[in-house]
Image (spheres, grey):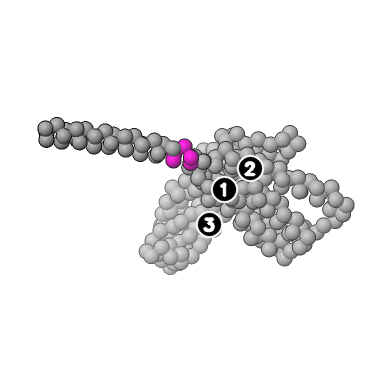
Amino acid sequence: MKKATVLLASCMIGTGLLFTGCSGSQQESKQEEEIHYADEDFVKDMAKGLEARWTLNEQDESKEGYDAIDLQSSEYKDMMISYINAELDCIGKYKDEKFEDSKLQEETISYINLLNDHIEICDYIPVDYYGKYLEEFQPIYDGRSKIIQDMADNYGLTVSDKFQSNLDEFKTNSKLVQEKDAQEQAIDSMLSNITFEEVPDEYAGDWKTYQGVVENTTGSDFSTFAVNINLLNADGVIVETAYDQVSNFTNGAKAQFEFSTDKEFTSTEVTVQYYE
C-alpha cells in the first residue's frame, strides 16, 4: 500500500514538473513576442525626419530676403540648427532602442552622432564659415550620404516624389565618396610598398641620398603625384620629413622618389600629400 502511495506521489510530482516546464516555456515565448524591435519604425521615421528638414529648408529659401542672408552669420547658424533638430526630433530616440539588425543599429547610432556633431560645429559658422566649418562639415555630410544610400538601397527608405531629387543627391555623393575612399586605400597600399635604398656616393659626406621605386597599381592616372616621407628613428619618432613629386604617373607606370638627409633614421613612412 505504501508503495502505491509513493508511486502515485511520484507521478503527481512528475506531472507537476511537466506542466511547470511547459508553463515556463510558454512564458519565455510570450516575453520574446513582447520584444519590439525598432528596425522598421526607424527607417520610416528617418524618412520623416529628412522630409521635415528639407521642408524647413524649402520654406526658408522661399522667404523674402533669404538670398541676402550672410552664410557667416548667427541667422544662418540658427537656421542650420533648426534643420538638424528637425531630423533629431524624429529619430533621436532610437539611439537607445532595440534593433534586430545589428548593422542597422550601428548605422542608426552613427547617423544620430553625425547630426549631433553637426550641431557642435555650427558654432564655427559666424566666425569661420569658409574655413573651420566647411572643413569639418564635409566629412559629416559624406558620412550621412553613405548611411542614407545604404538605407535607401538595403532597408527600404523612400521619400515622397517632391523630395526624390534631394535623396538622389545624397546617393550620388555617397557613390563619389566611396570611389574616393577606394582610391585612397589603393594609394595607401601602393605607398606602403616603397623601400628606399642609399645611393652610393663617396663624396656625399654626412648628407646621403635615398631612392625608392614604386609601381602605380591604383587603377588611376595622376598628372601630379606628391608625397611626404617621414624619417623615423628606432622609437618611431619622426626626425625629419622629406618631400618629392612626380608627373604623368599613369596606371601601371613606375616612378622613382628621392630624398637627401644628414639625419640618422631606421625606417620611412610615405603618405600622399597631393594628387590630381
Q: Is residue 34 magenta?
A: yes
Residue 126: percent from left, percent from top: 74, 64
Q: Nearer the viewer, residue 162 or 18?
A: 18
Specify whether 144 is left or right of 102.
right
Q: Please name the amino acid that badge 3 sits on.
A: Asn
Specify whether 272 is left or right of 11.
right
| Residue matched to label 1 | 94
| Residue matched to label 3 | 228
Q: Secondary structure at mark 2?
A: helix
CA distance separating discs 2 and 3: 46 Å
Q: Please name the amino acid that badge 2 sits on.
A: Asp
- Secondary structure character of the magenta stretch overall: helix
Q: Are marks 2 and 1 in contact (CB under 8 Å)?
A: yes
| Residue matched to label 2 | 45
Quadrant of the rendering where the N terminus is positioned:
top left
Q: Of the residues tagged 2 and 3, which is closer to the observer?
A: 2
Residue 160: percent from left, percent from top: 72, 35
Q: Nearer the viewer, residue 57 or 183?
A: 57
Q: Is residue 63 visible?
A: yes
Q: Residue at x 84, y 47 (%)?
A: 62
The image quarter in which residue 121 lies = bottom right
Q: Of the residues tagged 3 and 1, which is closer to the observer?
A: 1
Specify whether 165 is left or right of 175.
right
What range of the chain is rendered magenta?
31-35
- 9 up-or-down from 214: above or below: above
- 40 up-or-down from 62: above or below: above
Q: Secondary structure at mark 3?
A: strand
CA distance separating discs 3 and 1: 43 Å
CA distance separating discs 2 and 1: 10 Å
Residue density around tag 2, few if under 14, some if 14–19, many if 20 or more, within 10 Å = some
